[in-house]
């Protein structure tokens, strides 16, 4: 089992009742990644090692985010985000 860093533990401050994620209730942490660029895959790989994290990748290039979701499994949700249209 991996030891989590203090920074990683701080990601779990929200309660499970805030959002209904399609991954199931066994996940403790919720992470929103803005963008699907070069370092996103490395970060997703690190976070999925713990097995207790919901990861939402919000990107203006939906196909890239979907590819990451397919690569790293059901803990990753890809969504389209156009920052100019909020």
Image (cartoon, grey):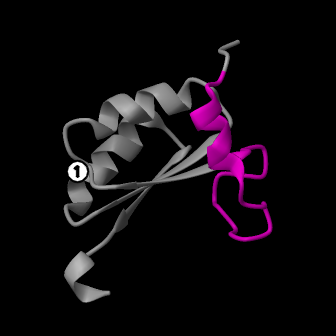
| Image location of residue 2, percent across then percent down | 65, 15
Q: Residue at x 67, y 16 (%)?
A: 3
Q: Residue at x 32, y 34 (%)?
A: 41
Q: Is residue 55 left or right of residue 62?
A: right
Q: Main secondary structure of the magenta part?
A: loop
Q: Is residue 42 left or right of residue 48?
A: left
59 or 84, which lies in front? 84
Q: Which residue is mark 1?
A: 64
Local crowd size for mark 1, using a 10 Å CA cut-off: few (<14), some (14–19), many (≥20): some
Q: Which residues are magenta?
A: 4-29
Q: Is residue 59 left or right of residue 12?
A: left
| Image location of residue 48, percent across then percent down | 54, 31
| Image location of residue 40, percent across then percent down | 31, 40
Question: What is the quadrant of the C terminus in the image?
Answer: bottom left
Residue 7 falls within the magenta-colored stretch: yes
24 or 30, which lies in front? 30
Residue 32 falls within the magenta-colored stretch: no
In terms of image quadrants, where is residue 79?
A: bottom left
Q: Is residue 62 left or right of residue 14?
A: left
In terms of image quadrants, where is residue 34?
A: bottom left
Residue projecting furthest to the top: 1
Question: What is the quadrant of the N terminus in the image?
Answer: top right
| Image location of residue 65, percent across then percent down | 30, 52
Q: Residue at x 32, y 52 (%)?
A: 66
Residue projecting furthest to the front: 6
The kind of secondary structure element at disc 1 is helix
């Amino acid at each position: 089992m991996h030891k989590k860093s203090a920074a990683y533990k701080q990601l779990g401050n929200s309660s499970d009742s805030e959002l209904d994620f399609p991954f199931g209730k066994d996940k403790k942490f919720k992470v929103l990644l803005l963008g699907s660029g070069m370092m996103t895959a490395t970060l997703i790989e690190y976070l999925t090692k713990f097995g207790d994290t919901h990861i939402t990748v919000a990107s203006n290039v939906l196909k890239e985010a979907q590819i990451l979701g397919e690569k790293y499994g059901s803990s990753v949700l890809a969504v389209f985000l156009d920052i100019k249209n909020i």
